[in-house]
Amino acid sequence: MHTEKILIIGANGQLGTVLTQRLQEKWGLKNVIASDIYPSDQLNGKFEILDATNFDGVQKIVKHYRITQIYHLAAVLSANGEKDPLKTWNINMTTLFNVLETSRLNSVGKVFFPSSIAVFGDNVQKELTPQYSILTPSTVYGMSKVAGENWVSYYHEKYGLDVRSIRYPGVIGYQSLPGGGTTDYAVEIYHKAMNNEPFECFLKNTATLPMIYMEDAIRATIELMDAPKTNITVRSSYNLAGMSFSPMQIAKTIQKLYPDFKIAYKPDFRQEIADSWPQSIDDSCARKDWNWMPNYNLESMTEDMIRNLKLREECFV
Ligand code: AKB
């Protein structure tokens, strides 16, 4: 098998932590270079401190390790992004430009750019939102992802750079905590239930959003990156669906295992963001082009989350 040299930017994040480990299993510890602005307390293997807003820093690592693939996961998410819009734009766009330019100049073979359901705003069909919809995002994070989708498509068109991208729904996993997103409640709720604590939800009970279990999100990412180039017909970013549920539905599913679990609703500014997003996603292009198919629904995800959170708790006592 040929060997790739992989750079992950934002390896300490929710997705990065798990994706780094999977890529290490796939390509070997020595072929995966994890990086972030802070040292990692979870990851083994090669790790570099990298501020991806610094072009020279990105370029130095790419040259030094002769990187052939970059997963660029660093970004300020939807809710945190609204606290400082200009800084969010600057970080999200500068890091992307640095990755695209370094990849072009150093003939990096493949780049992964994560987009999000945050690219959609009002003016779209909220149920089974189509791949090709009008994109009028309500957050700076969403604006940076729409611009990012156009830039990756431009780099593919003009320079032949093989950038691939997924519009992630909210990602839920037991391995890591999200930070600063609108869908984060759906991870925290499991930790509260496990600790027999009540949960105050920052979204209203009926706020249905597209979500995906970490296992499926990681598998989708790797399947997209492994797909033959000729299969990739979407060069902006693929719609991806896992499941859709509201806070009330996830709470009811948890209550089947924890009957005393209590939830209260106190919607804040994040409800407005959730209102602007789709409720479910049409991912037929991903299904057709690279055979995407999710494995988990709300019930099977809940069982797996709780089983794994319990296992982790046992390990730490
Ligand atoms: C967020 O809530 O900002 C993210 C996302 C859907 O991109 N989880």
Image (cartoon, rainbow, N blue to C red):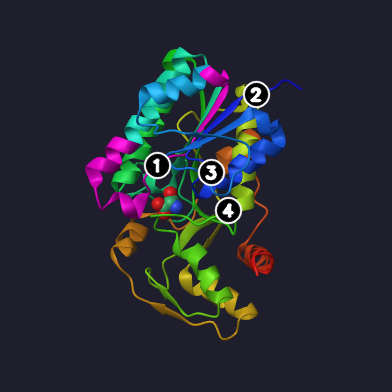
Is residue 236 part of the magenta span, yes or no?
Answer: no
Gap between marks 1 and 2, in whole Å?
24 Å
Judge: label 2 CB < 8 Å from ligand 1.
no
User: Of callouts 2 and 4, which one flags the residue occurring earlier in the amino acid sequence?
Assistant: 2
Residue 81 drawn at (x, y percent): 31, 49
Which disc is residue 242 wearing?
4
- The amino acid type found where label 1 is placed reads Ala
Q: Residue furthest right?
A: 1
- The amino acid type found where label 2 is placed reads Glu
For mark 2, give the secondary structure: loop
For mark 1, give the secondary structure: loop
Say which residue label 3 marks: 16
Gap between marks 2 and 4, in whole Å?
29 Å
Residue 183 drawn at (x, y percent): 44, 59
Looking at the image, which is closer to me, 220 or 196? 196
Residue at 47%, 80% in the rendered image: 198
Say which residue label 1 marks: 75
For mark 3, give the secondary structure: helix
**Number of other residues with Cα within 10 Å of mark 2, as a class: few under 14, some 14 to 19, many 20 or more:** some
Residue at 33%, 33% in the rendered image: 93
- The amino acid type found where label 4 is placed reads Gly
User: Of callouts 3 and 4, which one flags the residue occurring earlier in the amino acid sequence?
Assistant: 3
Which disc is residue 284 wearing?
none
Gap between marks 3 and 4, in whole Å?
19 Å
Residue 109 to residue 14: above or below: above
Span shown in magenta = 64-91
Say which residue label 2 marks: 4
Residue 286 seen in the current view:
yes
Gap between marks 3 and 2, in whole Å?
18 Å
Q: Residue furthest bottom?
A: 260
Marks 1, 4: nearer the viewer? 1
Marks 3, 4: nearer the viewer? 3
